[in-house]
Amino acid sequence: MKQRIVLLGPPASGKGTQAELLVSSFGIPHVSTGALLRVECANGTSVGKEADRWTSQGLLVPDELAIRLITIWIAEHGTKFLFDGFPRTVAQAESLDTALAALRAPLDLVIVLELGEEEICRRIASRLSCLHCGATFSCMLNSLKVGDMCLRCGEKLLRRTDDQPAAVEKRLESYRELTFPVIGYYERTAPELIHRVDASMESDAVFSEICELIRS
Ligand code: AMP
């Protein structure tokens, strides 16, 4: 079974949803750098304040900050992981490879969730998030609005600042310019690890494809 997995994909391609399903099925420790940053922001830490300057505008935080968070996470949790939202630049991917080589624990799977921009925008426009437990819901599927209770933990649902239309355009730009090349990086350096999954399918179908990749 694969145990060092990177989940790549544009915003709203279902990385968080798939990661949750995978954690409950396989128990692989999961980390989302976006979620780590939101916790830092909510706690008002210096890292959170620095990150908010970038994330609220839909920009990536500096590589050094994202790499620092992941390095601390690996030191605390070890070398079995499902990374969601990391690496997001080629520099981050190179730095991860170097860190894992030093630990003699190379990546064993890179999953790319593929989704067209029209569907990305549609999903983000209908997305409500709980900043308390991290759950996300589609307001269309669940008849919810801002301020309603989270269906999982009961806290208030909000629209993430980076899900506002101006920030979404920036996030898509960051994805095209900085994150998309990460796929090319793995195609060059580790083509046997990379697998593409059509993220426009129902999440159950996406999940079963990913399960096969993890078990194979
Ligand atoms: P996400 O929840 O994965 O959509 O991430 C939310 C925001 O956190 C992103 O739009 C970025 O501003 C920031 N972020 C998350 N992961 C990274 C990363 N690996 N590198 C740089 N910025 C990141």
Image (cartoon, rainbow, N blue to C red):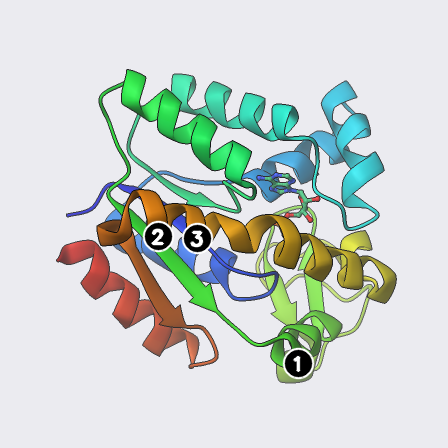
Helix, strand or loop at label 1? It is: helix
Q: Are marks 2 and 3 in contact (CB under 8 Å)?
A: yes
Q: Which mark is residue 118?
A: 1
Q: Which mark is residue 184?
A: 3
Query: Which residue does the image show at 72% across and 63% down from the upper left?
Result: 149
Say above or below: 25 vs 29: below
The residue indicated by pointer 2 is: 187
* Gap between marks 2 and 3 measured at Cα: 5 Å
Total marks in image: 3
Q: Which quarter of the frame holds ligand 1?
A: top right
**Where residue 16 sits: x, y (%)?**
50, 56
Whether residue 80 sits left or right of residue 129 in the image: it is: left
**Where residue 56 sits: x, y (%)?**
82, 46
* Gap between marks 1 and 3 measured at Cα: 23 Å
- Of the numbered discs 1 and 3, the one sitting upstream in the chain is 1
Say above or below: 105 vs 28: above
Query: Which residue does the image show at 70% across and 82% down from the upper left?
Result: 143
Identify residue type, mark 1: Glu
Identify residue type, mark 2: Glu
Q: Looking at the rendering, which quadrant does residue 54 occupy?
A: top right
